[in-house]
């Protein structure tokens, strides 16, 4: 393909796959395995308020975590850091690298923890969800 660099072609493929991933998630959304009661949600709220998921909308690993969050019926702040900006800079500066998904865990009096890898994030969130259920 004259005039197109391999980087441009890869970017186009990545954007196209990302759009398909987003569309698939909208057509087949995850459903909570069981609805939490309002009392359970209130009990979870302080813990979940300290957690943010840094993610890209079209990333398949981020989608995996978002779907798990929905299945667990957890209310977690999602931070889209796909484009340049403050959130992306925070992820790189404080988290140490531009890798998503990344779970930011703020604990009072302790250093902020940045948890990478979708399976580790899902496991951590599962423990939180079970502890208060």
Image (tube, rainbow, N blue to C red):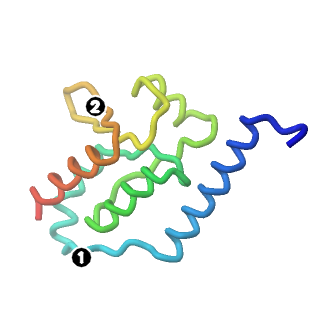
Identify whether 79 is placed above or below 95.
Answer: below
Give whichever of discs 2 and 1 has the lower sequence position. Answer: 1
Q: What element carries label 1?
A: loop
Q: Is mark 2 on a helix, strand or loop?
A: strand
Residue occupied by mark 2:
113
Identify whether 11 is placed above or below 69.
Answer: above
Residue occupied by mark 1:
35
Comparing 124 with 28, the one in front is: 28
* Residue at position x 39%, y 57% in the image: 64
Comparing 1 with 105, the one in front is: 1
Q: Mark 2 to mark 1: distance in Å?
A: 28 Å
Quadrant where the N terminus lies? top right
* Residue at position x 9%, y 56% in the image: 131
Residue, far right = 2
- Residue 43 lies, in percent from the top left, at 16, 60
- Residue 62 lies, in percent from the top left, at 44, 51
Q: In which quarter of the image is residue 17?
A: bottom right
């Amino acid at each position: 393909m004259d005039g197109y660099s391999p980087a441009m072609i890869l970017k186009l493929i990545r954007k196209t796959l990302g759009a398909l991933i987003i569309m698939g998630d909208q057509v087949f959304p995850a459903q909570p395995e069981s609805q939490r009661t309002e009392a359970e949600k209130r009990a979870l709220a302080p813990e979940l308020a300290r957690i943010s998921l840094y993610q890209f909308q079209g990333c398949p690993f981020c989608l995996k975590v978002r779907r798990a969050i929905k299945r667990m019926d957890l209310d977690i702040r999602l931070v889209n850091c796909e484009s340049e900006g403050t959130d992306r800079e925070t992820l790189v500066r404080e988290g140490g690298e531009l890798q998503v998904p990344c779970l930011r865990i703020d604990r009072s009096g302790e250093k902020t923890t940045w948890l990478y890898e979708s399976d580790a994030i899902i496991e951590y969130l599962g423990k939180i969800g079970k502890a208060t259920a």
